[in-house]
Image: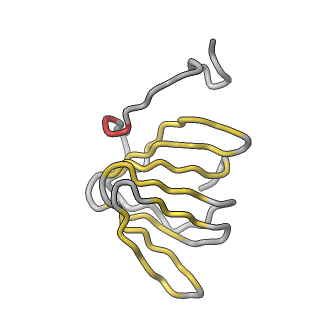
């Protein structure tokens, strides 16, 4: 049986094998209750942004330096495979992969 995206009801994604034709290319894993779960591949920094809602950012493979602003100050943290970054509404942030990275992002559908 196919779902709304035209895919079977069950799917396995081998995240370490996922690549894209451009930095931050993504595969949509699921759309649930206005939220999307997407697998991204990148080897280039993203852009500074603020999401429309909360964001959960999970490094599956590689390393990422996450820059974020709090009270006007810019800070950063190195995220290793298995680490999770949570951005509350209004948190300005940008991800800079250190080499190649695969990242699972859960956020409000249509967010930047």
**Residue depicted at 41% across the width and 76% down the height:** 76
**Residue depicted at 52% across the width and 70% down the height:** 93
Seen as rendered, the residue at the extreme left is 99
Residue 85 position, x and y percent, is 49, 63
The residue nearer to you, when weighing 65 against 112, is: 65
Q: Which of the 4 quarters of the picture holds residue 45? A: bottom left
**Residue depicted at 33% across the width and 52% down the height:** 101
Q: 40 left or right of 53?
A: left
Q: Which of the 4 quarters of the picture holds residue 62? A: bottom left
The residue nearer to you, when weighing 15 against 44, is: 15
Image position of 55 with respect to 5: above or below = below
Residue 35 position, x and y percent, is 67, 45
**Residue depicted at 50% across the width and 56% down the height:** 57
Seen as rendered, the residue at the extreme bottom is 72
What quarter of the picture does the C terminus occupy? Answer: bottom right
Q: 55 left or right of 42?
A: right
Image position of 102 with respect to 70: above or below = above
Image position of 86 with respect to 8: above or below = below
What quarter of the picture does the N terminus occupy? Answer: top right
How is colour applied across the structure in the image?
A: secondary structure
Count how many numbered circles sit on residues in the image. Answer: 0
Seen as rendered, the residue at the extreme front is 82
Residue 37 position, x and y percent, is 57, 43
Seen as rendered, the residue at the extreme right is 33
């Amino acid at each position: 049986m196919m779902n709304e995206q035209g895919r079977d009801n069950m799917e396995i994604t081998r995240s370490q094998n996922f690549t894209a034709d451009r930095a931050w290319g993504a595969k949509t894993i699921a759309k649930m209750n206005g939220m999307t779960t997407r697998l991204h591949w990148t080897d280039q920094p993203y852009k500074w942004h603020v999401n429309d809602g909360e964001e959960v950012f999970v490094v599956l493979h590689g390393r990422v330096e996450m820059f974020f602003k709090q009270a006007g100050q810019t800070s950063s943290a190195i995220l290793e495979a298995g680490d999770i970054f949570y951005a509350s509404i209004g948190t300005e942030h940008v991800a800079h992969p250190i080499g190649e990275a695969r990242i699972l992002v859960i956020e409000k559908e249509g967010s930047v």
